[in-house]
Amino acid sequence: MPTTGLRFVAPRSSWRVSSTQSAPEGRIDVWLSKTDSGRRPDVRGRCRGILLEEELEVCSSFHQEADRNLALVARAHLRQSLSRHAPVDPRAWRFSKGLEGKPEIAGAEAAHGLEFNLSHTRALVACAVARGFPIGVDVEDTARELDPLELATRVFTPAESQALRALPPGPRKRRFFELWTLKEAWLKACGAGFSIDPRSLEFDLSQAGRVHARLPGEDSSQWWFAVRPIGVGHVLALAARCGPKVPRVRIRHSVPGDIDCYSQDRA
């Protein structure tokens, strides 16, 4: 599909969003878990209880304990998040890779029509779940030490880089993460990863509460975007190819490895 250029969109609540409809259709649930809870023996035990043997082997292969705990929490978090949306035991989910390498649900459980995406950073893992349209999520630790202007030359368009340079240091760093998470979320929603140069897509957040998007080879009117802070140390972005739909977004917190509550939260 052709690129349509930057699209003007109206704001929605506290999110920076892109949409063309005022009445929301569908929903995206974003489940959050604190990854540092993986240091607790009881949490690790619960997480191990819902993972397959091959997943446990992958988690154990990391050299650093923090990385092992992160992998354990993230994989368990995905399983329990999906089970909040379908009558499936968290242990029963099976996964495969789609044509573009994006993870997807495999086997009989695919009939539930769920789409998901997972992202993690320091202290936080996020799983986005929807039904009927592809989604991508990215979460980043905004306390990370980095030079936004130096990195911008490698991942941002000239217009995005110029917008960063015009901001003072504090807002500049925050805007860097907003733009970066939007790019990551879209690349993940497409399943493209970094086979697409992130400099080939462009986001403009210069108008408060609004997202403008230009996407390579895509009609931007078919995409919806949102970006917002999570607490004081993280930023989260969503991308969904849902056409004219404006999904409602729910953000909820979850206890890693908690398999007893999954049937209570199903929606």
Image (cartoon, rainbow, N blue to C red):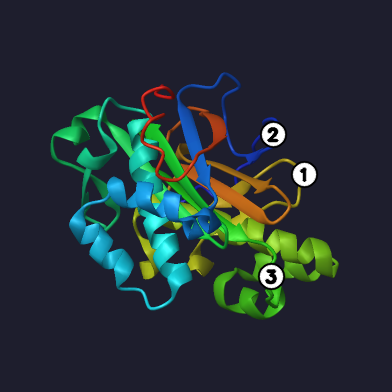
Element marked by disc 1? loop
Residue 187 appears in view: yes
Q: Which mark is residue 161?
A: 3
Mark 1 is surrounded, within 10 Å at the Cα level, by few (under 14), some (14 to 19) or many (20 or more) other residues, namely few
Element marked by disc 2? loop
Q: Is residue 198 above or below residue 34?
A: below
Of residues 226 and 56, the one drawn nearer to the viewer in this rendering: 56
Residue 251, horizontal then vertical, whole percent:
56, 35
Element marked by disc 3? helix
Q: Which mark is residue 11?
A: 2
Circles 2 and 1: CB atoms closer than 8 Å: yes
Which amino acid lies under the numbered mark 2 shown in the image of this protein? Pro
Q: Which mark is residue 208?
A: 1
Calculate the distance from the C-alpha at mark 2 to the C-alpha at mark 1: 8 Å
Mark 2 is surrounded, within 10 Å at the Cα level, by few (under 14), some (14 to 19) or many (20 or more) other residues, namely some
Q: Return the residue found at the far front.
A: 41
**Nearer-N-terminus badge (2/3):** 2
**Nearer-N-terminus badge (3/1):** 3
